[in-house]
Image (tube, rainbow, N blue to C red):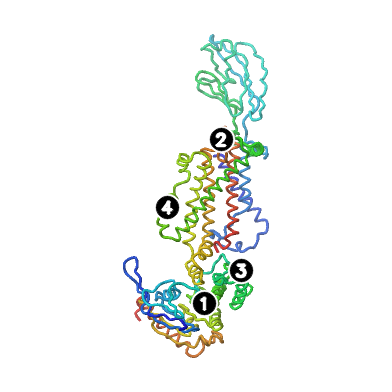
Amino acid sequence: MTILIIYVVIFIAAFYIVKAVSSMSKSREDFTSLKTVTFGDESAVTPNRAASIISVFAIFAIWAAFTGSKLIPFHVPGPFIGELSFTYTAVNSLGEKDDADVRISVYDVQTGEIPEKIDIELGSGFALNDTAQIIAWRSALIKVKKNDVGGKDKKYKIITINGEPISPSSELFIDDARIYMTAKGTLSLTPYKGWQMQPIWLPSPEAVWSRLIKVSSEGYKNFSLFEHLGWSLLRVIVGFVAGALIGIPLGYAMGLSGWFRGWFDPIVEFMRPVPPLALIPLVIIWFGIGEQGKIILLFLASLWIMTISARAGVSGVNIAKIHAAYSLGASKWQIMRLVIVPNSLPEIFTGARVSMGVCWGTVVAAELVAAQKGAGMMIINASKFQMTDLVIMGIVLIGVIGYAIDILMRIAENYLVPWKGK
Amino acid sequence: MKGLSIENISMRFDLKNGSSVQALKDVSLDIEEGQIITVLGPSGCGKTTLLNIVAGFLAPTEGKVVLNDQIVLGPGAERGMVFQQGALFEWMNVQENVAFGPRMKGMPKAEQNKKVKHLLGVVGLADFEDKAVYELSGGMQQRVALARCLANDPDVILMDEPLGALDALTREKMQGLVLKLWKETGKTILLITHSVEEAILLGERLLVLAPRPGRIHKEYKLPFAEMGVNMDLRDVKKSDGYTETRDEILSIIWEMEEEIMGRTDDN
């Protein structure tokens, strides 16, 4: 919630700052700037590049600020690390009172250094001084009665902390910590946790980065990072190509022949809305968890999309083009090759882009279920060992690759079907 | 016998709701080689159906089309077509579009190029060979369509409202071009239009079709196409008889339209 509010504040502040800055610089007098009606005119709305850049930076800044990253100078308050102390008053079975001091060192386990035990003197009286160590973000039971004379007696009780009375099942706050007395009279101490996320929930950006460096040089689970990602990509490409090789001719046949359309319409229309993920259990039962099953799953994911797009490409051909080709003396085969196929390319490319996206999503999901290598396997395995940095690294890489695939498809589309939308 | 003859064509087809439509009834027409004929009629009178039958895209229920002693049974390269719009191949450039017909015949590449260059010059698009068709304006696209049709050297050119989608100024220029091509190539041209002016200016013979069922209502023999070959079309429009013919045909068309729509006023 706090993060959301901060994000909204950054959003609004950035808007006004950019607006103020850009109003100072001379505005360009392009055609759009002369339009008086821009609200509702879609063509007048262009993405503000400054907003895009600030948006990306804002996400990183919030991420860094809430994880105590060293990349940026400002952070939200972190957990208390250092030494805590308090004094407790105990009353023994005879009704006598005595004070003792407790000194606790709170340390960050991420650094790998465990501080030495604090040297204390036991002090005098029946209540003796104590010491303890607590890892930041955790709580611990402080068994102060353990070393006290008569501390095991049932009537031996702690009645105040730093002079404030405490009773079982209640809490009180000292500087930088919260103390809770359990029903049985033991003290539980929780140092101040701050606002930062524990690395186990959200590691800092540099932790993710260093994990990336480490995994890319050492690999993970017997396979290098390149192999994990490469295998996922290979499965997608093989599955997609297989789907396209069957789906496109099938789509053409459905677009050109009433028998084919009648025969395959029920199958295609039924299979199309079935999410590929719903097929995973059946594919595992039939083909096992090896490569074969995954490729068949991806084949099925792309097959229907490619079939439908090829069919739409054929149906979408302007009849005047077909008539023109016939009256120019073209044969059926020439019309197929020179008119129908090129005319359907824009539709097929749209289908291919959708299909690649679906395949990429499906392969990660399939690897989550069962795989020895692959991007999905890497992150599900890392999550079992609570290697959150590796999980986040994997998610980012999966996103980057998916985005790259789409960009490549768009470049190929612009190059191969420049007439699209003209 | 050289030329195109349309013999007693009737066209009747069933609709899904059980009723049937008589699109054409007993249409007969003899066209000599080298004539330019325009067909005019209110919408729904079967103009396009007639053209599609001549092109071979539709089979008539009765009658036949004979071209140079051969009965038309399907589409063929000897009957070239120019469509209103959207019939160019966007994935080919201007050169490839125009060379499509010769390529289908297996003409050698060098000969194709020569022919394309010549024809693009004729239609006024010299040096446009490498342009993509979607970069051209509507008028230029129709010039390419004309060149593509001529490249195949057809006996008859069928035009289905070829200038219908163009603006008035471009249209006037293109009308001049059609006449010029007609005279230079000596082709037989059958042109369908819904513009009365265009029909009068371009038709050596002008057929007015009547709707329901589609049939030939009246035929005119006009001098304006021959005049337009050497004269500015605006001057042709000022010549004797033009205005009278136009008014007469307009009133025929209006009457037919009113019959279809029902009279809208009581005057």
Which one is nearer the viewer's eye here, A208 or A344? A344
User: From mark 1 to mark 4, how far is it between C-alphas?
Assistant: 45 Å
At x 60% / y 11%, what residue is drawn?
A: A126
Question: Does B214 appear above or below A112?
Answer: below
Q: Distance between the residues labelled 4 and 2?
A: 36 Å
Q: Do labels 2 and 1 share a chain?
A: no
Q: Distance between the residues labelled 4 and 3?
A: 41 Å
Chain for numbered disc 1 = B
The answer to whether one can see residue B264 in this image is no
Question: Do marks 2 and 3 share a chain?
Answer: no
Name the front one of labels 3 and 1. 1
Residue A369 can be seen in this image:
yes
Chain letter of the residue beneath label 2 in the structure image: A
Mark 4 or mark 2: name the one nearer the start of the chain.
Answer: 4
- Parent chain of label 3: B
* Numbered circle sitting on residue A269: 4
* Label 4 residue SS: helix
Number of other residues with Cα within 10 Å of mark 2, as a class: few under 14, some 14 to 19, many 20 or more: some
Q: Which of marks 1 and 4 is in front?
A: 1
Residue kind at label 3, given as amino acid type: Lys
For disc 4, the chain is A
